[in-house]
Amino acid sequence: MCIDRLAQKLAREHTLNDDEYLALLQNRTPELADRMAELARAAREPVYGTAVYTRGLIEISNICKNDCLYCGIRRSNGNVERYRLEPDVIVACAHQGYELGFRTIVLQGGEDGFYTDEVLAGIVERIVATCPDTAVTLSMGERSRTSYQRLFDAGATRYLLRHETATRAHYERLHPAQMSWDNRMRCLHDLRDIGYQVGAGFMVGAPYQTMEHLVTEMRFVEQFKPDMCGIGPFVPHHDTPFAHEPAGTLELTLFLLSMIRLIHPHVLLPATTALGTIDPRGREKGMLAGANVVMPNLSPVAVRKNYQLYDNKICMGEESAICRGCLARRMESVGHHLVVDRGDIKR
Ligand code: 5AD
Ligand code: FES
């Protein structure tokens, strides 16, 4: 079958067999990418139009017990100045975000034992009580089912936990032996069962990633159907074992964004900060490939330099208000517009 027919088949049926996924990935050309992006925007149109949802991201702690090989704030990186934000500071950042028009607040951090269920639930309750019609999203790593339940009961309704890779053997090459792919999957299923809107995702061009792995990623999106799928290029961090590995490419990331949109037209698809890091117009290009979410930083400027998962991260010195204005202009430049909205998935 000619490649354009495969693209049309994906748009129509939202699934391909493994060989077809592989053929699409292996026969990428600039023309095919344009075609995929066009189909992806058409699939998004009836669901979200050209509205772009924003999530205000507060990086609450860079202290982490894990040692993921790709991550700049891994435990064994002794060159990071460690910090954690106090609950009052986090709530103040959320309020500032609310004033700026954010209706989703994401609390993200390393797996830091300071944020017990009690502490985290307290913060969630305060934000829920004071920010009307705002969704509180957590991105605090792997926790027990009881913990996820407790935080859901406190008012958190969404959870972001990238699966990182849908292939167990690949997961084991990106993480130390103490971490397990099974537990990662257990977490995602628990979160879904409890009732969270769940975000999963993976890095494009992660070390050892093959095209066959990407076929497995597409199958995972098809089968697990995450509400959000966060994909961005792998970007090396100089203080990690992967310091000298090549970064993922803009081209492949955009192509995968389009594929994911076609598989799951309703998915929330962020144009990530990592995408904006490898290309000055990466996020705008992400929208044109079918993305519909951006997640600017609401962290206090003083701590931002210490939350570097990868090198050259953008927006390190920008006040939150500047970032929102900047993004609004960037989105307008490609015919999209930021909206003040919780940005729930439309099912
Ligand atoms: N490059 C790109 N993304 C990274 N992440 C962690 N380290 C890197 C890196 N070096 C991503 C992971 C994680 C998310 C918070 O950031 O996918 O889940
Ligand atoms: Fe942060 Fe442009 S998005 S300054």
Image (cartoon, rainbow, N blue to C red):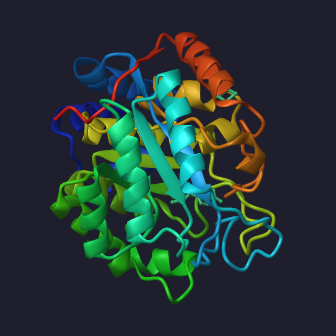
Q: Where is residue 284 in the image (x, y as percent from the top left)?
A: 56, 24
Closer to the camera in the image, 224 or 319? 319
**Residue 232: % across, % down:** 54, 47
Residue ID at (20%, 57%): 223
Residue 54 left/right relative to 200: right
Tell me the quarter of the picture where residue 73 sits.
Answer: bottom right
* Residue 325 visible in this rendered orientation of the protein: yes
Q: Height in image: 306 above or below 187?
A: above
Above or below, comparing residue 43 to residue 299 in the picture: above
Question: What residue is at 74 percent from the left and 71 percent from the top?
Answer: 240
- Compared to 215, does 284 lie above or below? above
Q: Number of marks in the image?
A: 0
Residue 269 x %, y %: 39, 38
Q: Nearer the viewer, residue 2 or 215?
A: 215
Point out residue 227 in the picture as x, y percentages from the top left corner.
Answer: 28, 46
Tell me, yes or no, if residue 17 can be seen here: no
Q: Residue at x 51, y 44 (%)?
A: 91
Q: In this view, does 156 lie above or below 47?
A: below
Q: Who is closer to the viewer here, 68 or 305?
A: 305
Relative placement, left or right, of 307 versus 107 is: right
- Residue drawn where x is 70% and y is 62% of the image: 83
